[in-house]
Image (spheres, grey):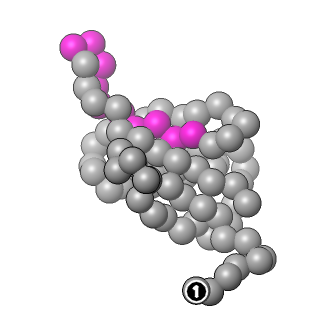
Amino acid sequence: MKAICTRYIPATETREARVRASAEGVRSVTISHWSADDSHLEAALALARQYGWTGRLVRGGAPDGRGDCFVFLGDKEVTV
């Protein structure tokens, strides 16, 4: 099961605010930040498209509160 984590990167004097999407074992993707919710989703989708990952994504908050985590649903779903 692959997980994609995103985090907000604040603007600096020379660069605009951005959102970075990363996953274990692959290069990250960084996009411009334009909307608090949609930017995290768009960054995660950009990373998934770059590597040809498909499937249903479930979104949740990151433990540190600085972004979101997206997990692809697999065949071994567990209902709690």
**The image quarter in which residue 50 lies:** top right
Q: Is residue 13 above or below residue 21?
A: above
For the residue labelled by badge 1, is the local secondary structure a helix, a strand or a loop?
loop
- The number of callouts visible is 1
Taking the magenta stretch, the answer to whether it contains residue 38 is no
* First to last magenta residue range: 13-22
Give the image location of residue 51, x and y in percent.
Answer: 71, 44
Please name the residue shown 62% across and 86% down the image.
Answer: 79
Q: Is residue 39 visible?
A: no
Q: Quadrant of residue 57?
A: bottom right
- Residue at figure coordinates x 35%, y 39% from the top left: 8
Pinpoint residue 35: horizontal percent, then vertical percent: 27, 49
Residue for point 64% across, 48% down = 49
Residue linked to disc 1:
80
| Residue 18 is covered by the magenta coloring | yes
Residue drawn where x is 73% and y is 71% of the image: 74
Q: What residue type is disc 1 on?
A: Val
Q: 2 or 18: nearer the eye? A: 2
x and y percentages locating residue 6 in the rendered image: 47, 45
Relative to 68, residue 75 above or below: below
**Is 65 rendered above or below residue 75?**
above
Q: Is residue 45 above or below residue 59?
A: above
Q: Residue furthest bottom?
A: 79
